[in-house]
Every structure is written in C-alpha cells, then in structure tokens.
Amino acid sequence: MASAALVPESHSHVLAEFDSLDPLLSALRLDSNRLKCTCLSVSRKWLALGSSGGGLNLIQRDGWKQRLFLTHKEGAISRVSCCSHDEDYVAVATSQGMVVVWELNQERRGKPERIYVSSEHRGRKVTALCWDTAVLRVFVGDHLGKVTAIKLNSSKQGKAAPAFVMFPVQIITTVDSRVVQLDYLDGKLLISSRTRSYLCDTEREKFWKIGNKERDGDYGACFFPAGRNLVGQQPLIYCARPGSRMWEVNFEGEVQSTHQFKQLLSSPPLPVIRLRLDLQYDSTPGPPQSLAFTKLLYLSEHSVLTWTDRTIYIFIPQNVQVLLWSEVRDIQDLSIYKNELFCLHHDGKVSHFSLLPVERCVERLIKRSCWDLAARVCHLFQNIIVLSKGRKVLPMDKLEHLKAQLDIVTQQESIAQLEDLMSKLEPLDSACSSRRSSISSHESFNVLDCGIYRVISRRGSQSDEDCESLHSQTLSEDDRLREQEEEQGDLDNVSHASMTADSDRNETLLPFNIQLPFRSTSPRVSLQAMKDSVTSFVRKTTEKIGTLHMNPDIRMRQEVKEDDRLLDVPVNDMSQPEEEKNEVDSHPPSCEEVSLGELKLSTAAAISKIQDPEVLFDPEAMVIILNTWLPYLEKAFSPQADPSDQDSDGEVPTTSSSCNNEDGEEGDFRPELGMTKDEGRAQTDLTKTEHPVIFHVTAPFPIEESLRRDLSSLAMLCLEFKVFTDGKDPLPSDLGSSACHFIQSYFFLLDLKRLKRCIALQYTDCPTVWDTYVQGLQDLTSSTPVAGAIASEALVSVIKLLSDEEPWDSPLLLAHACRMYEKFGETAVRSLIRFYPSILPLDVMQLCRGNQRHFLAYLDSLIKSKPVDQRSSLLQSLVQPESLKMDWLLLAVSHDAPQTSNTLDPEGNPKPNSHLFTWGYGPLIDLLIKLPADYETKQKMSTVCRTFGYWRGYVSLCLELDRRTEALTNIVFLDDLSLIDEVSGVIPETMDEWKLILQLAKSHDSYPHSHDHHQHQNGTENGSSVSNGHTDWPNCITVENVALLLMKVIGTERAWPYLQEWGATESFSDRYTKVCDIMKVAEKRQRALIQSMLERCETFLWSQQA
C-alpha cells in the first residue's frame, strides 16, 4: 500500500465543519433567489442574519431554538453587529445609509424596540460597525471616510428625558478614503481606511496616523489584547500591509516591526474536516503568496484571522508563524466568537467552522460516531497525535475503541492506517512504563488530572546507579535545550521567513510551559563553577579598565608603591600561580587603549557640562567645551607615527581622515545596515578636493554603545556649532572644506538623520558638504542588493525593491535615489514622490542642482498627488526655511511659461487677455503666492509676477497688499470683465473705485488697438506653441459693459445719477437701453415677491400667537 502524504507536526490545528446550517436557512426562507442572506454577526448568545428584504433574523445559538425577526423599511440590511458586553442590543445598517439600534428587552420578556435611528450616513454606504467595549456606544464608518459615534440611552438606564428628545450623533473624524474596518479597545478607536490606519483616543479627542507609508486597497487592522498571563503588558495593534505583511504597532500608535508572511504561505493548505466530503491533502509546496489582508480579526491569545474570497488564514503574528490556512470557496464575510467561525458565502449560504487542535477534532468525531473520518484524520495527522499532548486526549484505549467500530470489509484501509499509528505509539508507552516501574520501586507517586506525575521520594531508597543514570539523562537534556536556545538566538538575527523550525512552532502554541517528567535541575556544582568563572572575569576586566582610566604619572607612582610593598610580603603570600602572573604582565595597556580611556573621561565631562541650562543657552560656552573635547577625539582616532608599521599581531594600525588607509583596516559589524566588516568598510577617494581623503564609514575598533551615543551627540554638536579646529574658527571660504573633512573622518559617529537636517539648515551655501554626505551614504550602501539592482535592472523593478525595504524612512534611501537619478534621470525623480517624507523636496533639490527643471516636475507631481484641500498645508510644511518660497516661485514662473513679449506691451503694461495664457506650473504658482508670508516677501512675489507677466497672481497679491487701485488698473488693461466679478474676481467697494474703472475704460477705448478683433485671434502663442485665445467680445471692459455691471450691483435707479455725473451716458447704445428696461422689470418683480413673502410670514406668525 503506497504511503499517503502526512501533515507535518508543526500544523497542530484544523478547521472542522460538524453541522450544516442549510436547514436553518431553509426554515428562515433565506435560500431562495428572491431573498438571501446579506450579512451576519455572532455573539455568545445570538447569530444575527441580515436579509436582502430588510429583515433581521436573530437565532439563539443554544439549540437554534428561539428566534426574533426585526423588520426595516429603510432598505436591505448591509451591516449588522451584536453588542458583545450586553447582548440585549444590536446595531443594523441599511442600504440607504440609515443606522438602527435595537433593544431586544429579553430580560423583561418585552418586545424589541428601536432606541435610535441615525440618518448621519444617509445616501452613503455604511462599511463598518463597531461597539464600544464598556458603554452603549456604536461607531459607524462609511465609504466616503466619515466616522461617527452613536451614544445610546436605553430603558435600563431610566427614561429621564422625554421620548421625543434625540441624542445627537458625534462626528469622530473624516478620513481620506473608504473605511475598511473599525475596532475598539480600552478607550481607543482603530480606523483602517484604504490608504492608512488611524488611532483615535475618543476621550481626549486625539488622533494619530499609524506609520508613514501609505497603501492603496482594502487593508484591515485590529487590536491584539494582552494575554491573561501577561499582567501589565499593553495591547498591540496589527495593521495589514501589501505583500502579505503586517505592521506590529504598540498601543501608542508607533510601528515596532514588520512581519512578512509571503514565504511562509508557500506551504500547502490544510484540508477542512467536513462530514460529507472526502479528506484530501497535497503536500506539494506552492509559490509564495502576496496577498492583501482585507480584514483582521483577533481570534485568541495568540492568533489573528483574515481571509480572501477563497481562503481562510490564521497567523500567530508575535512569532511570525502560520497556524493554518485552508481553502473555503466564495467567502463574502466572516464573523467569529472565540474559536467558532461563521462564514457567509456569495450565494447567501452560511457555514459554521470550529478551530480545534487535531486531537480534539478526532475526539468530537468519535463522539458523533464518524468512525471512518476519525480514522483518516488520525492517519493524516499522526505526527501530531503521537506527541504526548495529543496522546493525553487520545489514549490507546480510545484508539482501540475506534478500531473496533470500523467495518473490517469496507474500511480495511482505515484499519490498516490506524494499526500503523498504534504501532508507533507502543515503543513510547513501553519505555514510559518501564521508567514508571523502575521509579515506582523506589518512590511513590500519584497522577494528577492534568497528566503530571507527582513523585514522593523515599530517602535512601534509590540506588547509586539509578542516580547516576538519571543525572546523565538530565545533563544530556540540559545540553540539548542549551543548544536549541543558542540556535534560536541566531535565528533572531535573520529574516522572518527563516523561522520555520517545527520544534519552535510547537512550543509557541502552549500558553504556559510544563517541565518534562523526571527532569531535575542542573547540578549545583556546575552552577558554582560558572559563578566562580564569571566573578574572576569581571574582577580582571575591572582592574584593567581602572588601569586604563588612570593618569600615567599616578599609574607609575602606584606601581612603585606596589613594588615596595611586595618586598615586605612573606614568602607564602608570593606563591600565586605563575600563569596568572604571566597573564597580567603580558597585556600592558597600548597607546590606543590609553587614548580611548582619555576620550571616555573627556566625553563624560563634556556631556555633563552641556547638560547645564546655562551652557545650553550660551553658544560661546558650548564652543569652548567642544574645543576642549575635540583634541581627545582626534587623538583617539588619529594614525600612528608610522602608518606602515604593524603591531605584534600583524594588524595594520588605523589611519585618520588625513592619511591614506591601508587595506588591512579592521571594521566592525553594523547590524542596522545588514553589512559585514568588509562590506561596511567603504573608502572612496574624493577627487574634488586637492588632497584625497578617505571615508570612515565604520569604526576602526569596537566602541561601547553608550560611549558611541555620547560621541555621536558631541560630534553632531561640533558640526552644528561649526567647531572643526582647536580653538580656531574656520574662515567662510574654508568652512565647506573643514566640514567635509570632519564628516569624512568621523562619518561612523554621526547621526545620519540629524546630519541631513544640519546640512539643510546651516550649510545651504556649501554644496560640497551635501555632496560629501551623499558620497558617504553611497559608500555605506555600495554592497547592498539595491545598489546592484539599480545598476542592472529596470526602474520599475528598482522601485518595487525599494518599496519593500525596511526601515522605510532610513537615510540610506537617499543614496539609492542619487544612483537612480544618475542612471534614469527625470523619470526617476518623478517616481520619488512615493518615498515622501523619507526623501524631502530639499533632498531632490540638491540632487537636481544641475537641472532645476527636473526638481520642478517632482515638486509639482508631489503637490498634485495629495487631495486639493491638503495641498496648501503640505506646501507650507515644505517651504522651510522661508527663503524657499521665493526660490521656488522664481523656478515656477521661469519654466514652461509664456514669453514675456506676449504678456507685456512696450510700456510695461499687461497685454489684453494675456492672463489667459497657459502656465505649465500655474497651480503651483497659485499655491505659493497664497501661502502666509510677511509683507516684504509678498511685495517680492508681486514684483516677480509682474516681471514675468503672471497677471492673475499679480492681481491677487495687489489685493492682498491693499493696492486695490493698481489691481483695478491692471484688470482694465487685461480687458476681461469676468475679473470684475463677485465670485471669480474683485468687485469695486466704493463709488470712487467704480469711477476709476469707468475713466480707465474710457481712456482704454481711445487706444487705436483696443478691442481689435485682429488682435484677439482664436489662438494665441504660448511661448512657441498655440494656446487658448479669447473671443467673447461682450466680455471686454468697455464703458457700457462697466455701466451695466454697476447697475446690476447697486440697482438701476441708484446707478443712473452716478453715470450722468461721470459723463458716461453719452456713448450708450440701444443694447444698454434694452438691458436697463429688462433689469427694471426684474427689480420690480423681485420687490413684489419679497413683499408678498413678508406679508405671508407676518400672517403666519400672528396666527401662531393667537
């Protein structure tokens, strides 16, 4: 008989369907084409099923006996949610966007009643419902991103208010896209939309965005409460990410790590145990699965559940393991209570699954008399059943009983498989029985209910041979466990995909650890030996460090005193081992160790001084402290007198930044970069300087983490306060070279994020400093896979690879962006918008110094990638320092813009309709000139707009600067009456301004070329191309058109005296007379209508008062 594939022992749980809900749906008449189930929710007591006809069926889960039927005239039921902490309440959302909350009144045996109906989401699709875990409050989210809370007043609380008083709905927030999932725990609301997840503190009304990187699609998020055994630990949050990933987030909304399940999902799916279907399992691994986890549901203390339309996945996220995944077709929605899953299918049917350990599943099948299926499950999962945990539930007598129930004729294959399983259990049973018999002869014991043997020892009854054998067995088990712990420690440093050890998976499923039977503690002698060894090592290390920290003069005096004291010591005290003497004498402190000790003392003193508030606010005192500390840093990392000499071990001494480094320089490992010593030691000669200097991207020798942090802080202060030499301020011409030299020499000490901010704010006039920083980043990443991919692959592949990099906000991303720009040009720059805010516009501006047009295209694409209402705030956050506003405005008006000869006439005034030209970066210009700025900056902006002929911006700035006369004058020159409009332009505020416009229009009409149809062609040149023209001549600014506009604003009767006084009525045409007559009739009818409405209102009010 060919052996079938068996499930590995790492898969200890299965999904089982023991009963069918089809008869229940048939009884509820939810199995027809006209009426079917649309949504579901489950709690401890109820199974709620919403229907397409607007009815809600509530079935009691205990025996599926009692049911309630609630009707809704507001449309089909789209969402339903049962209250978990008070099962007398249920919330329902309909297809019209109405939310209805019911009180079932089961305790008082009354009729269910509606206690609230919310129309806040009317006309929208409600996508999520979630109950508060403590009070009666429902959270609602819809497809436009609106989230509200409905706080309820039930009859249990007493109806102190009248029945007609409705409690208002609180609007929590409105997110930028459709709400995918809501979850609530301990006063915080978790909102997952299509683009990102948000954490809301509903009591303090504070909101946080989770993570920096957005997404595009339906991705869920859920709370992960702390386990009952973990007292004091805060809950976690898990957010779905593209590519089968999850973010692990703490309860404050900070991303802790990213878990990758893509490779783990290449394992074959486990079969679902069904009573009516055959059991099939294919052990062939499949390809890795890159999935979008639409929703995440907390299942137990260890696991999280998610699903697609054809598969159910259960993960143990804290250990990055897949508990199981199984194929279930046509899934529309899913609801869970503890380990029970209720699945709604697209055809309206409902399935009921249970998540069980394999042995518990077999036990249930035996109780249901499903003998053949139980035997086949035992065979398929025999690797789990043979374990001690499985055998406690399925002892040998139960398997014998199962075998006896099988038909010897029709089920012969199942009997053979079961016998094979039982044969594998016999050797272990016999060994245990022999061990029990040997121990029982010397000790008495009793068996607890959980299966643990409690041994009662008899003193002196056990032989020495038994003690030795038991001791050797304990030592071997301890050694084996120690090796497993060391292997586990190594596995923690690699990727999540490598964590697939079967033993680890089995152990993590236990909520607590149980010691193996008959395991004793480690021998006390070995513990004492380890203690003595550690004590000796600490004592020697402390003595050596103390020697390093001493002043050389004090050390010499102390050695002399010790030599004199040794002469007076008796001979028996001098009998210390010769080996210890040789060990102490053979390791004198080297010059490097002495320099490092002095650096530690100097660093500690400097850190202590700069923490003084008086020093923090006194730049001169800070510079003095840094000048005092800097020589110790240079001495500790300076080269030897002769760089070519080697020490006794054959190692090449470390060189400083001013000398060429040898190939034998020793570098340390930087785990945050994932680089080895040889990869991390990137040393590149900068040919831009006169004397090439070598980068030190790694430390020349290992440095303690605490010392490294202090050195990094002081080194960054040196850069920020521009302290590079011993007590001498560098000249402005030498500032850039001094900063470059400092960065190259101590690159391994600098905080890369802080260094980038420092360069952007204090070294804007020294582009070589930025180039040095980027060069260091490139050397640091020269051996990474991304650098190789940029050199050999297409841009799309490189961007996908960069998107999967973690951490996503690393400064090293800038080095990859520089390489991409050097190879792919403007296309690469435009693609960098997806890496904002890791790569800022200031960074791209530095990359594109040689071609500012590329930067302008990037900036415009970045602004347009955001919603319209967020663009201004985004741009305001980017223009730091303030000088960037003018720099970017000059770039925008000078690129892809009309020629100045087409916007300005010879006198410097606007050409008619020149504001209608198309500007390539017009939206960006409008945003820049609308940003808040001081008066001087606004004046400079207006000058720039006038110089380049951007008249819309110029008119807007004139109005903002209270230069209305100048703005109105330019509008007349532009000859577009639509600019004098209450909606889209500016309207004169005083009669003097109206008089000014009429006079300007009269003088403008006297020009020979004004309103010439030959001047206004259908197409006008925009630079060298044809753009949109303007041919709506009644919209030109003439005396007659301005007079009509005045009459429209203030009325015909009021406008006529002014027009006569200003002498504007002489040149009116018949068109003016006709328009005036029409306007008079319209005004008369409008007055009559207003009068009639007022009279009716008055009559109604008097009738109400009576």
Image (cartoon, rainbow, N blue to C red):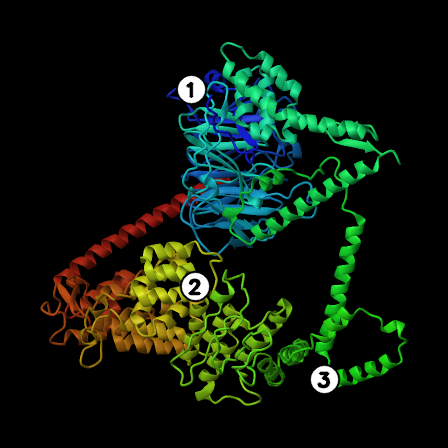
Residue at the farthest left position:
1014
In terms of depth relative to the viewer, which is nearer, 536 or 86? 536
- Crowd rating for badge 1 (residues with CA inside 10 Å; few <14, some 14–19, many 20+): some
Please indicate whether residue 546 sits to the left or right of residue 957 in the image.
right
Work out whether residue 948 or residue 574 is closer to the camera in this orientation and state it. 574
Residue sitting at x 72%, y 73%: 544
Q: Amino acid at mark 1?
A: Asp
| Mark positioned earlier in the residue sequence (1 or 2) | 1
Mark 3 crowdedness (10 Å alpha carbons): few <14, some 14-19, many ≥20: few
Q: CA distance from mark 3 to mark 1?
A: 93 Å
Residue placed under numbered mark 2 in the picture: 783
Q: Is residue 813 visible?
A: yes
**Percent position of residue 1105, x then y:** 50, 41
Q: Amino acid at mark 2?
A: Ser
Instruction: Mark 2: give few (<14), some (14-19) or many (20+) Cα within 10 Å.
Output: some
Q: Which residue is mark 1?
A: 31
Provide residue 915's location: percent of width, then percent of height.
23, 68
Q: Nearer the viewer, residue 660 or 1055?
A: 660
Q: Nearer the viewer, mark 3 or mark 1?
A: 3
Residue at position x 56%, y 76% in the image? 715
* Above or below for 567 versus 159: below
**Could you tell me how far apart the alpha carbons at marks 3 and 2 are, in whole angstroms?**
43 Å
Disc with the residue nearer the chain's start (3 vs 1): 1
Q: Position of residue 988 (x, y in %)?
A: 31, 68
Give the residue number, with chain letter if any, for mark 3: 552
**Secondary structure under the numbered disc 1 in the rendered image:** loop
Residue 452's place in the image compared with 619, above or below, is above
Percent position (x, y) of residue 623?
Answer: 59, 84
